[in-house]
Image (tube, rainbow, N blue to C red):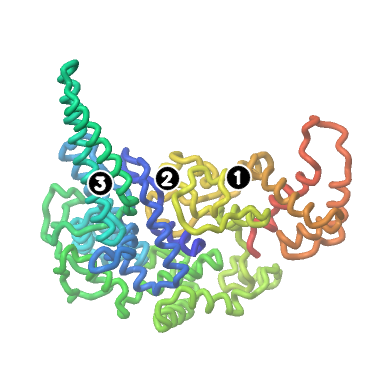
Amino acid sequence: GEKGGRHWLDVARYNEGFGGFTDNGPNAFAWRYRDWGVRKFNADLPYDDFVRQQVAGDLNGTVESKLGTGFLALGPTFRTDGGDPDSAAAAKSETLDDRVDTLTRGLLGVTVACARCHDHKFDPIPTLDYYSLAGIFNNSTSQIAPIAPQNLVDAFNQAQAEVNRLNNELKKANDVIKKAGASVTMQQTAHRDALQIQRDAAQKNVPPKYDEAHVLKDIGNRNMTVALRGDIRKIGPEAPRRFLRIIEGEQAVLYSAGSGRQELSESIVHPDNPLTSRVIVNRVWLHHFGRGLVTTPSNFGLLGNKPSHPHLLDWLASEFVHRGWSIKQLHRTILTSATYQQSSQYDAAAFSVDGDNKYLWRYPPRRMDVELWRDSLIFATGELDQQLGGPPQNNILQSRRRTVYASSSRNGDQFASDQFLRLFDFATPRASIAKRTTTTIPQQFLFMLNSQFMIERARQFYNRLASDSEDSQTRIERGYALLYNRVPTEEELKIGLTFVSSVQTQGPADKIDKWIQYCQMLLSSNELMFIR
C-alpha cells in the first residue's frame, strides 16, 4: 500500500502545500489523503470504486470516502493578490485548469487542458468539451471538514460551546471587578471564582476534537460558458456539463445532479470507456518495468506514443476489469509472467536487434526511486519504523519512517526533506506527473560519500554485522547476503578482508573506522541501488 500509494501520489500531484501563484503555505491536513490512498491500496479497493471516491466520495458516501476527494481538493488553489478583476479571473481559470488537467491526464490519459483556449490541435477535443468538465468543478469547492461520525462532531461542538460561553461570562465578571477597583464586593469575586471553577470543569469534559481533512463539496449546479481565448470574462456559448464526446459520442448524456461529479465518476469507470482501464494498467506496468507499454502514460492521444504491445495492453485491461478492477490481481498477473521473471543479463545478439529492449528480451535494469532506495537502506540496518500513517516528517533524514511520509512542497524549498528528495529525482508536484525522470549527477555521489545520513547508516549496518559475528569473513558474507542476496566472489572477499584489516597511518585521530567505511561502500553501491 505504501509503495503503490506513493506511485499514485505522483499522479495526484500530492504535496503538503496549497501551491499557487504566491500561496504555498502548509496544508496541515493533506496527509489524510495520503493515508487514505495507502489504506485503499492495502485493502485492494476495486479501482473503479477508487476512482468514484476520488471524484465524488463526498456525495452519498461514507466519512472515509470523503477523504478520497483530496485527489481534487488538494490541487493548487490560485488566489488573487489584490482582488482586481484580471487577477480574480486568472486565479479562477488556473484553479479550474488544474482540476481538469489532473482528472483527464491522470485517469483518462488525454490532454484536455490543451483545449482551454482553442480546440485541441491534434485530438478531437473541442473547447466546448473542456468547459463542460470545467463547469463541473466550478460547482465544487474545497473545504476543511470533519471526518468523524456526526455524533462525535456534535458532542465536541456542544462541549466547546459551553466552554466558550463560560469564558465570555468569566471575562464579563473580570471586567466588573476591574472597573470596581477598591470597591469590589465579596459577592463579585465569589461569582468570578465560581465561574472559573465551572469553566475549568467544562474544559475537562470536552472530548478530543474530531479529525479534519481537505475535501470537496458541491456549491451549485450551473453550466459554465466557454471562455473565449481562455479569458473567462469574455463569454462564449454555454457548455452543458457532460462527458467527453471523444469517448461517449455526440449523444453524451447531460449531467444534472448537483455539480455533476457523481455522474462524471460513473462515466469514467463505465465498461464502455476504453481508456480508464488501459491507463491504470499501463501505469502499473510502468512501475514494474521502468517503461510503460505506452511510453507516454498520461497521453494516449495523437501526440502520445503508440503501445509497443497493443494486444497485450488490451488483454491486460480486459482481464483487469473482468477480475473486478483488482490492482493486486493485476500485480500477480504481471509478476508471475515469464516476461517479468527474465534475467537482466546482457545478450549481444539480442542487443544488436533490439538495442532499446522494446520487445523485452531481458528484464530492464533500472534505478530505484528515492523512496525505495532510502527505505532499503534503513531496512538493511534494522532501523525501519514500519508504523502506518500519521503526520508528515519535516526532515525525513532524521526519521526512521518510510519515505512516503516525508513532507514535500510544490516549490521544492518549503520543508527540510525537499532538498534530499529532489537530489534523487523526486517529482515536483506542480501538476499530475506521468513519469519521473532519472538523472545521474555528482551531487548524488557526494551525498553517499559525505552525508551524515549515510555515515550513520554505515555505522548502524556495521553494528548489525558485528552483533552477528566477530569473524571478518563471516561479517562480509553476511553483509552481501543482506544487501545483495548473494555471496561475495573470491575477489570481493579478498578486497574486503584486506581493506578492513589495513591500518590507517595518516589522517585525523577521529578517523572513521575502517569497518564503517567498508559498510558505507556496500550501502552506496549500484548493485543495491538498481533493480535487476
Rendering coords of residue 42 (x, y %): 47, 68
Residue type at tag 1: Ile
* Disc 1 + disc 2, Cβ < 8 Å: no
Local crowd at mark 2 within 10 Å, few (<14), some, or many (≥20)? many
Counting residues from the start of the chain, the first of labels 1 and 3 encountered is 3
The label nearer to you, 1 versus 3, is 3
The label nearer to you, 3 versus 2, is 3
SS at circle 3 = helix
Query: Would residue 142 be found to the left or right of residue 374 on screen?
Result: left
Q: Report the residue marked by disc 2.
A: 409
Instruction: Give the alpha-carbon distance from disc 1 to disc 3, as whole Å.
Output: 55 Å
Q: Report the residue marked by disc 3.
A: 160
Residue type at tag 3: Gln
The label nearer to you, 1 versus 2, is 2
Q: Report the residue marked by disc 1.
A: 441
Rendering coords of residue 247 (x, y %): 28, 73
Image: 364 above or below 393: below
Q: Which mark is residue 370?
A: none
